[in-house]
Image (tube, rainbow, N blue to C red):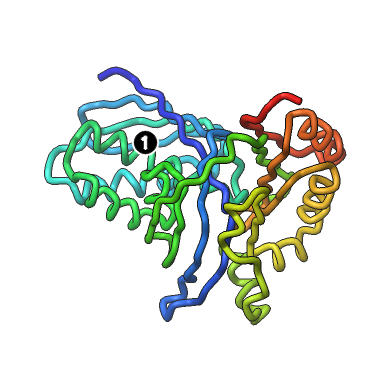
Amino acid sequence: MPSVTLRAGCKVNLYLRITGKRPDGLHTMESLFYPMPVPADTLQLTPHPEPGIRVSCRLPYLRGETNILVKAYRAYAAAARVAVPGVDIHLVKRIPVGAGLGGGSSDAAALLRWLEGEAGALGEKDLRAVAAQVGADVPFFLLGSPAWVTGIGEELTPVSIDFGQYVQVIVSPRVRVSTAWAYQCWDEAALTLAEAPAKEGAFATPPVFWNDFESVVVDRFPVIGQIKEALLGAGALACVMSGSGSNLFALFPSQAVSRAARQAVERWRVGWHEVGGAVA
């Protein structure tokens, strides 16, 4: 069987409210997810007739049994009623870990979509159900378009939103944030829901973004707040931390303004991932 290369993009949260905590300990949310093509991981697949999966990666902690790709493969194989091809995967990781961009979930969704294309065992509804078993964000990456996400992340409502008139930038500080830690801090702070702009503000011109996690994450990692302030000061029309952090998503009116903003944050040695916008 020929080798295959898959590309897995990422997501940003334009709006994120933590709405509660269930008896099982999982948190509920209301969030607007927006897909971004960069940064992106690459999955280099080598199929073979024997069932099973092996994962290699330059990063030691993403190799082997603990990788979400192994969980996704086994969940699909357990749900399928036909033989599922085995596969060796070399993961080239470009989406930062601990960034709030959903990189692992995106990788898992890409593999599930490939498996369904090869085996055709489930159909779209059952494939989404398997994706939800693998991880809360995985169904969104199967959808691949902007959506309101509620519940623990499994309830999706597609929406129409287009930022093509802006330069869209994901900024990657040199810090990693654990999602479990961020939720724990949120719980320990015993926060009441802070006043937030209406969620419809994300569709305004220019948009208004919001993320409940910023209040606890920036307190522990002030550099995230410093970078955000610098981006806004340099001309960003909107800027928000994605997910539980640490990455930021910003919109600029032109490439000229985005270049100036990039210079304004150079001292923090951030990653810079840019899409679209008019030259001005």
Question: Which residue in the protein does label 1 denote?
Answer: 54
Quarter the C terminus occupies: top right
The quadrant holding residue 167 is: top right
Pinpoint residue 178: horizontal percent, then vertical percent: 61, 58
- Mark 1: which secondary structure? strand
Residue 36 picture location, percent across and down: 54, 39
In the foreground, 19 or 23: 19
Q: Is residue 164 left or right of residue 255?
A: left
The mark total stands at: 1
Residue 57 in the image: above or below residue 197: above
> Residue 205's x, y, as percent?
65, 48
Q: Tell me the quarter of the picture where residue 164 sits.
A: top right
Seen as rendered, the residue at the extreme top is 2
Q: Quadrant of the N terminus?
A: top left
Q: Is residue 134 above or below residue 275?
A: below
Identified by mark 1, the residue type is: Arg
Choose top left, top right, bottom left or bottom right for residue 252: top right
In screen coordinates, is 138 left or right of 113? right
